[in-house]
Image (cartoon, helix red, strand yellow):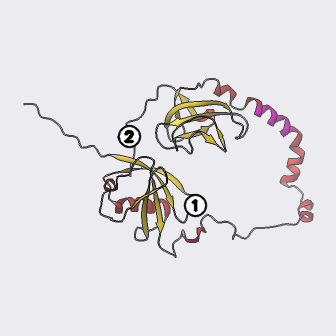
Amino acid sequence: MASLLHVEVDETVFLRVTHSNLSHFAADVRFSLQSTIESVKEKLWRKTGTSVDSMSLQLYDDAGQKVCDLSDNQRPLGFYSPRDGYRLHIIDLDPSSVTAGGWLEDTSAVEKYTISEEAYDKLGFTFRKFKEKMAPQMSTANEDNVKDDYEDLAVAIKVGDRCQVEPGEKRGVVKFVGRAETLPPGFWIGVQYDEPLGKHDGIVKGKRYFDCPPLHGAMVRPDKVKVGDYPERDPFEEDEI
């Protein structure tokens, strides 16, 4: 009699991770729903520096509403029913933590070297003098670069193409090809990722270039994009923590 092989699937979820003391820190991370909260904290400790004992976790939905506190270290993450696109917020409870006060991101207290304009002008060779010497040549070169910047690569990419974006081999579909008035000169490719690995929903600096779900959109240069037969990946083949 033929026997059936039972394969247990370890389900995963994509969460945006933020930190109470690190205003500029945000990462999209895939977690196993079978991992305990303590295990999740250990992985996050390696990413942020907040110790497990000093870490409190909160779960927010994709509308920004708090769902719950992940208070039981022995519970699996799946017990709290997180969904793709939810936010996992780290609260560092240690007032002496390396992240306390935001000083890891604050460079205002760093003493800066200063020099007077008179003393700077007396220096033999400076970057300012180099720029003044090269200005006419750089101006002409910049005009040429703005005109042709990535255009030769962009013509081979069409809206609707399946693609893979480097670095990270992120897959998705092309949603925009062209110049973007709110971005630096040259051609840009708008991509809707298959997973929430992007930064926006198609709106960049106040202008909408395409439509996609939140955190699925990205604007990248054509040299980062490969088009072809790139089907959506099985989520269970991805690395997880």
Q: Quadrant of residue 140?
A: top right
136 in the magenta segment: no
Say which of marks 1 and 2 sits in front. Answer: 1
Q: Is residue 143 above or below residue 29?
A: above
The mark that comes first in sequence, 1 or 2, is 1
Could you tell me residue 156's position as x and y percent?
A: 61, 23
Q: Is residue 96 above or below residue 115?
A: below
Q: Secondary structure at mark 1?
A: loop
Could you tell me residue 129's position as x and y percent?
A: 88, 51
Name which residue type carries label 2: Pro
Q: CA distance from mark 1 to mark 2?
A: 29 Å
Q: Is residue 82 above or below residue 75?
A: above
Dominant secondary structure of the residues highlighted in magenta in the image:
helix
145 in the magenta segment: yes
Pick the residue in front: 178 or 237.
178
* Residue at screen point 12% across, 34% down: 3
Q: What segment is highlighted magenta in the picture?
A: 137-146
Name which residue type carries label 1: Ser
Disc 1: which residue: 23
Q: Would residue 136 be found to the left or right of residue 193 on screen?
A: right
Q: Secondary structure at mark 2?
A: helix
Could you tell me residue 11's position as x and y percent?
A: 32, 46
Q: Would residue 187 be found to the left or right of residue 230 on screen?
A: right
Pick the residue in front: 82 or 73.
82
* Residue at screen point 43% across, 67% down: 55
